[in-house]
Structure formats: C-alpha cells, structure tokens
Amino acid sequence: MILFEEALNIIDQCAVPLLTEKVRLEECLGRVLSEDVFSDMDMPPFDKSAVDGYACRHADLDRELKVLETIPAGKVPTIYIGAGECSKLMTGGMLPAGADTVIMVEDVEITGTDTIRFTASRTSQNYCLKAEDITKGEKVLDKGTFIRPQEIAILASVGCAIPEVYKQPRIGIISTGDELVEPAETPALSQIRNSNAYQLIAQVKRADCIATYFGIARDTEEDTLEIIEQTAAGSDIVILTGGISAGDFDFVPAVIQMAGFDIKFRSMAVQPGKPVIFATRGKQYLVALPGNPVSSFVQFELLVKHLIKLITGSKTNGTHIKIPMGTDYQRRNISRKAFFPVYLSAEGTAMPVEYHGSAHIHSYIHADGIVTIEIGENEIRKGTLVNVRLV
C-alpha cells in the first residue's frame, strides 16, 4: 500500500503525451493545444472608435465643426481632418488621419446640414490605439491550454482556423461481476444494476474524452481476459471496476498481467479507493477501480483525470476553491488520507454531506466538491480554510 502522492508520482513517470492532430476551429472545444499560438496581426489593427460619434481635433472642441464624411465600420477614411473639421464615425470604425478625439453623438448639437457643435464640458478620447491589446507576432495562447469558448475567440481573431491539438483519449470501460445486470433489466434476488459503467461513461465524456463501453465481464479468467484484450485493442486507457479486492473471485490482477500489462501499484492509503490498480502496456494504461460506486467516482476524479491531463498535455489542474469549513468535521480512522463530499452553503462555507461510506453514491447527488483530510488528522475545525475540488 503506497501513499496517494506516490501513486501520482508513478503516473507522472509513466504518462506519455498522445499524438497531435489538426482540427477545425468549430470542433476544438474541450481540446488541448499542442503548440503555442501567435498573432498574425496587431489588435486592434488600426486606431478605432469606441463609440458612435464624430472624429475631430481636441483643440477644436470649442468651435463649430464641418462634417466631411461618414465612416462606417469596415470603411477606410478618405479625408484628412484639419482645423475646424470632423467626420461622422461609427463604433469600430477607423480613426481618420488628423483626428485625436471622438466625441460621442450624445454630446453633439447639429447646427446645420453639414455642421455640428460639441455641447459637453469635457470628453475622453474615445478610441482604441492600434496594437494596444496584442502586437503582431505576440504569443496569445500557450501550448497545453485547455480550449474553452474564450480561447476559441482568440484563435479566431488571430487567424488560427485549424489549430493543432492533442488527440482525444479513447477510454474503454469494463464492469466485472456475475452479480451485475444492466439498468434496463430487473435484478434477481442476488443481483444489482450496473451503475458504475454509466457513471464512468459520463465522467469520461465530461473530461472531453471518447468513451466506449465494452460490457460486463463475468467472473471467469477467460471472459475477463477476452474483454480486457478486446477493450485494449482500441483504447488509450482501459478502466474496469470490481474484482480487485481479496475475494475468491477477485482474480482481475492476475488477468491484467496475462493481458501483458505491467502493474505499477495496486493499493493506496486512501479512503475511499484503497484497492486501485494502475498498469501500463507500452503507451497504453489500465486503471482498475473498486466496485463500490463512490470509490470509482472519487478515484476517477483524482487519479484518472490526472492521467488524462498528462497524456493530453494539459496545464490545467482541475477546478478548486479555497473556503472555510462551515462546521467541525471529525473521523475515527486516521490511518489513510480521506476524501469526503461537501456542499457549498449560501454563507460561502464547505458543509459535509451526510455520507455512509463508499457504497453511498446517493450522497454525491448533494455534493459540490471533495475535501481532503490527511493521514494522522482526525478533525477539521470550523473556520479552517479547506481546498474544495469541485465535482
């Protein structure tokens, strides 16, 4: 049994980034950039108006101004602004040469067919300088950036229409156990419905990976080996649940090795999720999670997501917030690092969710996140700042 931190270090040492591919801009949401991105132009590319108004010289604000032309956004000005002159300019339009101020249309009195007068006591310049946001050749996004809608806007603005990204991990999911039936079936007296697989499918999809479910492996070495080999044939990561404890039918570790995987660790000093296997076969990975649904849920969030981050080259560390505990939290067993569910109260505190153990997945319906309590600690006092990993 190794420490959780040791398990992460082993995964760090084994993980190899996936290959890369080019994808269209509209298809790259949730992907990770595999190269730095640079701007191909200044932004803004010219001095542009921030308001609808009139471009003029600041020195002429106390006199009547002659309107020379109207400049909509997208049109290049054709007339220089001299003394006593102005041009009507729309938001986003290019500032004409000679002008150093745009007066807002709300601050203008029309005095004739082609004349105006500034009526306010003062004004800002009301235009954006060329390249004040980004200069040509400037790096705008780093390799390893997780692409959200705001990153897509940046990619589009600098002309990166087909960005290079890491391939999406293909994750194959297996459940094990004769006691399992699929959700649409009615369980017999000694059976239960298979919730783990569908929970994991959802978690894999939420992690922006490709999920494929390969079914339930029955409690024989032959069936388990066949389904592991079938799953591994088309997957970057194989995830299976159940069959890894110490029961008479828990032969999964041996079968994993029969399939050619090298087991790197098989137990962690954590709760929930003590019996977790991490194994490798070349650039493929296998994670065997406990059959208890909370254990599989939590260790996917903590371990599998860490592996996904590494093989996709992502620099993100998940979503965490630091807030105070809203009440005292106590436990009896201090021999393992523990993870327990909390919800975020209206007062901005972390409140423990009622939790009855690793089979109590219903508790996570009410959970906003997970809090850690370290080995040797039996209490977190009210008001203590805790790191909440949002789920």
Image (cartoon, helix red, strand yellow):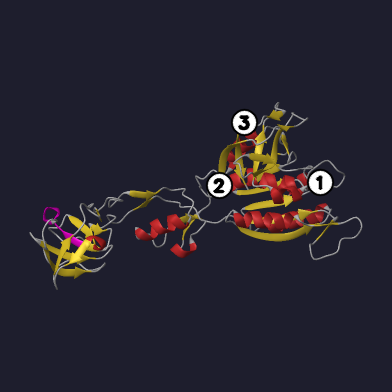
Contact (Cβ within 8 Å) of mark 2 with mark 3: no
The residue identified by callout 3 is 384
Please state which of residues 169 and 292 is positioned toward the viewer in this rendering.
Answer: 292
2 vs 1, front mark: 2
2 vs 3, front mark: 3
Residue at image coords 15%, 62%: 117
The residue identified by callout 2 is 309
Contact (Cβ within 8 Å) of mark 3 with mark 1: no
The residue identified by callout 1 is 251
**Inter-mark Cα distance, 2 to 1:** 30 Å
- Residue 339 shows in this picture: yes
| Side of 387 where 22 appears, left or right | left
| Side of 348 where 243 appears, left or right | right
- Dot 1 amino acid type: Phe
Q: Which residues are magenta?
A: 54-60
- Dot 3 amino acid type: Thr
Sequence-first tag of 2 and 3: 2
Numbered label tally? 3
For the view shown, which residue lies furthest in the top direction? 376
For the view shown, which residue lies furthest in the left direction? 83
x and y percentages locating residue 253 in the rendered image: 76, 44
